[in-house]
Image (cartoon, rainbow, N blue to C red):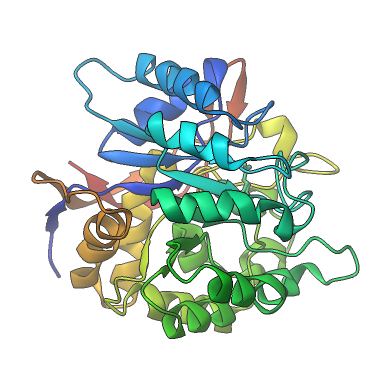
Amino acid sequence: MSQSLTICRPDDWHIHLRDGQALEHTVPDAARYFGRAIIMPNLVPPVIQAEQALAYKERILAARPEGSNFDPLMVLYLTDNTSADDIARAKEAGVVACKLYPAGATTNSDSGVTDIKNVYPALDAMQEHSIRFCLHGEVTDSSIDIFDREQRFIDSTLQQLNKDFPELKMVLEHITTKDAADFVNAAGDNMAATITAHHLLYNRNHMLAGGIRPHYYCLPILKRSSHQEALIAAACSGSPKFFLGTDSAPHAKHAKEAACGCAGAYTAYAAVELYAEAFEDANALDKLEGFASHFGPDFYGLPRHDDTITLVREDWTVPDSMDFGDSDLVPLRAGETLRWRVA
Ligand SMILES: NC(=O)N[C@@H](CC(=O)O)C(=O)O
Ligand SMILES: [Zn+2]
Ligand SMILES: [Zn+2]
């Protein structure tokens, strides 16, 4: 049993840092060892213009710990009205990706897209400017069972998008099903996916059996264990199509532990440690580096980092709660033991 593991510095290709006072906590957690991160734009109001992305980036940079080189990669939130011009200005501002939130699909998605055809002009411009397309892949029709919404999105929307924009590099984010893993595997090089640590470690029994555990509630929702197994196989396959995106999504404790609790799990405080557990359980620790540190930058056309981080085997107890601006936050695995720590 190896006692330490050194890998190329990883990046997080999907994270929610939120805004305001929360940044004082979320940014140092992400910057602890991630070199870069794709910053989700679902703020209130959302980041829909280049100027907003630049201003948000400044607020993130201001929250970095002394000496940190953490590089936030900014993302524009697509709406029904995003124009080709908006995309051109975003490119100039250094925005690397645009994000599809089907309207109503998830946290702060009210300004999202009501009909995929509405963003076709923006997608054309993104293809032209080589801006990545990040997708929250779930249908929103209230008649569709919540456990089927990702698979339905693939059939109803993603297949067509892939045909209509063969040159557009797309990331199906936080995949949760075997259907998604199979689709991405079978698609061309333009199609990749991120996988969260919690979808590798858990299935819906962890959330619902023996009592309801709101801190495991996230979107897309945890599925049955056969899907979890397919995600583990994809992440550990060594395929460059699958890479790290934590979807660390903090909500205040009172907003999670409520009659109608928010979706999202906070994992950024120990993201690589959590992934290491999942890869170790699958006997695939040797595959962690590609997934965490190589395939993401390769897909985004960015250089891999030339420095490393070291994980050491060391049990430690996750705090019951953490500071989160003017409230508290309960991290995933609160009060439990983790078995790796980044030195
Ligand atoms: N994943 C989640 O459950 N929540 C995310 C939104 C998202 O990534 O869909 C959030 O912003 O809270
Ligand atoms: Zn999402
Ligand atoms: Zn997210």
Image position of 210 (left or right of 154) = right
Seen in the image, is 264 located left or right of residue 209? left
| Residue 315 at least partly seen | yes
Image quarter in which the C terminus is found: top left
Q: Position of residue 183 (x, y in %)?
A: 52, 81
| Residue at the farthest right position | 143
Q: Find residue 279 and report its horizontal and vertical position in percent.
A: 31, 69
Which picture quadrant has residue 330? top right
- 96 or 265: nearer the viewer: 96
Residue lying at 51% horizontally and 28% vertically, measured from the top left: 50
> From where the camera sits, is residue 218 visible?
no
The quadrant in which the N terminus is found is bottom left
Residue that appears at 72% across and 43% down? 109
Above or below, comparing residue 252 to residue 164 in the picture: above
Judged left or right of residue 227, residue 14 is left
Out of 109 and 169, give the one closest to the viewer: 169
Residue 61 drawn at (x, y percent): 35, 19
Q: Nearer the viewer, residue 225 or 23?
A: 23
Q: Is residue 239 above or below residue 86?
A: below
Extreme-left residue of the structure: 306
In the rendered image, the vertical position of residue 216 relative to residue 319, given as above or below: below
Q: Image quadrant of residue 70? A: top left
Give the camera-side residue of 190 and 34. Answer: 190
Q: Residue at x 8, y 46 (%)?
A: 306
Q: Position of residue 3 (x, y in %)?
A: 13, 59
Count of numbered circles in the view:
0
